[in-house]
Image (tube, rainbow, N blue to C red):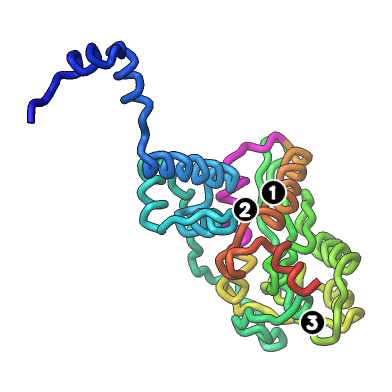
Amino acid sequence: MKHHSIKETCKVLSVPRSTYYEHQQNHVSPQAKRRKTLSQSIKRIYFNSRRIYGAPKILKALQKEGKTASIKLVQRLMRQMGLKSITRKKWHYQQTNDIDTTDYSNILAQDFRTTSPNQKWCADITYIHTKANGWCYLSSIQDLYSRKIIAHKISRHMTADLVISTFQQAFETRKTTNNLIVHTDLGSQYRSAGFEQILAQHHIRHSYSKRGCPYDNSCLESFHASLKKEEVYQHHYQDFEEANAAIFSYIESFYNSARIHSSIDYLTPNEKEKLVA
């Protein structure tokens, strides 16, 4: 069979060679089109997640949108676009000052399972730095059922009043029962008479982490690690007011509302709570 050149073929068909080459450049296979569309979706999900989602979570997000793909394809497309999840710092076990822990029992005992909201809460404090005001302190409470941050307050002082006011905020929106367990570390704020009194008024049992063991409160430790890597370490807050506004936005607009969690079947905390609404 004789093969004709492009020049000869175009002359016979009265088609300019420029038209032929333009058609060739514009012709894209269905597979290439699909991968381009998928890449665009991956990129959108990645940046909407504040660059924290890796391939597994991006795949789950794609599936929630009705798109199909394999984990290997998502990984390959992410590599081609230079997208990778922000890595997280890991905890290091550290001993604290000696405390007589005889009267501080660990009721939770690392059993984070629940069947409904308001069965088990965790509370903790973490540090947020600002240029003008130095260290500020974030007090958070998390419901272990949904991993939702149900109350949070920032203060320039790490006092018992800070944790008490955080719990008062939680009581305004949550119903408590006699079965509720609140788990904290052995910080002086959580061992204060005022804090113990407010728990007693609501018939709440108080569980404590073992001395120097963050794994006893790992769910809330994980939240604080995510907060630091995904928000705090990405910015340099000028003052307390800027930090307060940024942390509020991260928790309410992103963490509770948009960020999916593998521990709750790749739902957001708000989506998880709607299951029992």
Name the mark nearer the viewer: 2 or 1. 1
Q: Secondary structure at mark 1?
A: helix
Tell whether 152 sits left or right of 64. right
Q: Position of residue 102 (x, y in %)?
A: 67, 88
Q: Amino acid at mark 2?
A: Leu
Instruction: Please check the rendered image and state whether residue 224 is part of the magenta-colored stretch, yes or no.
Output: yes
Q: Residue at x 64, y 81 (%)?
A: 113
Q: Which mark is residue 152?
A: none
- Determine whether, in the image, residue 260 is placed left or right of residue 84: right
Dot 3: what SS?
loop
Residue located beneath label 3 in the image: 180
Front residue of this view, candidates 157 and 16: 16
Q: Which residue is mark 2?
A: 227
Looking at the figure, which quarter contains the N terminus?
A: top left
Give the residue displayed 61% in from the left and 70% down from the top. Answer: 264
Q: Main secondary structure of the magenta part?
A: helix
The numbered mark, 2 or 3, whose residue comes first in the sequence reads 3
Q: Specify the quadrant that holds the C terminus.
A: bottom right
Residue 237 on the magenta segment: yes
Reply above or below: 131 against 57.
Answer: above
Report the amino acid beneath label 1: Tyr
Q: Marks 1 and 2: in contact by CB < 8 Å?
A: yes
Q: Nearer the viewer, residue 169 or 20?
A: 20
Looking at the image, can residue 188 be seen? no
Horizontally, residue 41 falls left or right of residue 3, namely right
Spot occupied by residue 73 in the image (x, y as percentages of width and height) = 38, 52
Which span is picked out in magenta? 222-238
